[in-house]
Image (cartoon, rainbow, N blue to C red):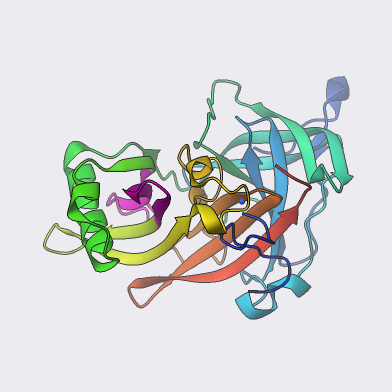
Amino acid sequence: MDSRHRSFLAIASVTFLAAWSHANGQPKLNAAPEKDTAAFYAVLDDGKRIEPIGVATKGSFPDEANSESGPTPKINARTSFNLIYGGSSIGTATVTSTSKGECSGDSGDISIRPASLKLRGFVMALATNTKPRSKTIHFRRSPTPSERAAAERLVREIYLKEKIPVAATKVLRSHNLTAIDVENDGTAELVGTYIASPKKDERGLLFFIASRKTDGSYGLEHSEFERATSENVMSGDVKDLDDGTIGNELLLDYYDVDGDGTAEIFSTGQAFEGRNFYVYRRASGAWRKIFSSYNYRCGY
C-alpha cells in the first residue's frame, strides 16, 4: 500500500452528452483530452460533487504498484463531463465551482443533467472527459429476489470462511447490492457491500463481485474482507462503520475503459481523512484490482 492509500484500520492513518453549446452562455464540454487519454471522476454527495479518480492512457491506468505516480485529473470551473450511469453516457456533469486545500481536498461542486436522475446516498456515478466507444445501453438496477438470494448464499459462504459466527449471518445487512451488465449480454453481474457484527466491538466488512455461471448459479469472482474492531478504527468506535458512510467499499459505476467489450468496475471507500478509489478489470474469470487512488482531506 503506497503512501497515498490509507486503510481505516490503521489508527494513525485514514479510513474512505454531447458537448454543450456555446449559445446562451452554457458551459462547453471539458477540453478534449490528450490523444488516447481519458480522465475519470467520482460523482458523489447525491450528485452534487465530483472528485478525481485517475487518468487512463490507451485504455490503461498506471500499474497498481505505481499508481501514485499517475496524473491527477483536473477539475476546472464551468466545464462539463459526460455523466456515466449504468455503464452508459446519459447526460452531463457541469462544474459550478472548485475546491482545493487540506480540508476540501481536490473537488468540484456540480450540477447534473438530466435532473430526473436521482443519485442518492450510495447510488453514485462516474464522470469522464471522453465519450464511450459505443452507444451501447447497459443497465444498473436492484437485484431480483432470486439474484439477492444467490448473493446472500455467497456472502454466508465468505463469512463462514472468515470465521464469522453463523448466528451473526442469520439476518444479513447490506449497504448496497446492485445488478449491472458489464458485457452487455443481458446477464447481470452482482456487486455488493455487506457488514456483519460478530461481536459488540467487531465488524466484518465485505465487498464482492459475482457473476452468473452457465448452469444459472452465481459464482464469486472477487471479494475483499476486512475485520475491524474499536481498537483499530481511527475514531475509536467501531459503530462508526455501521451506516456504511465510513470504511465500507461501495460501487461507483462501470465503464469500458479499454474498449474490449467488458467494462471495468469502479468503487470507492470514504475514509476519516479522505476517500479511496479503486478500478477492477476482469481477466480469466476473475476481477483484479488494477488501479487505486486517494484524495486526501482533513478529518471527516
Residue 104 picture quarter: top right
Which image quarter holds the N terminus? bottom right
Residue under the image location 59 percent in, 57 percent down: 8
Residue 283 shown left or right of residue 34 in the figure:
left
Counting from the top left corner in percent of width and height, residue 241 is at 50, 44
> Does the magenta stretch mainly form a helix, a strand or a loop?
strand
Counting from the top left corner in percent of width and height, residue 38 is at 70, 59
Region in magenta: 177-206
Counting from the top left corner in percent of width and height, residue 159 is at 27, 59
Residue 246 shown left or right of residue 171 in the figure:
right
Residue under the image location 30 percent in, 59 percent down: 210
Toward the viewer: 159 or 18? 159
In the image, residue 96 sits, relative to residue 225, either above or below, namely above
* Magenta highlight on residue 190: yes
In the image, residue 134 sits, relative to residue 35, either above or below, namely above
Residue 169 shown left or right of residue 230 in the figure:
left
Toward the viewer: 214 or 165? 165
* Magenta highlight on residue 116: no
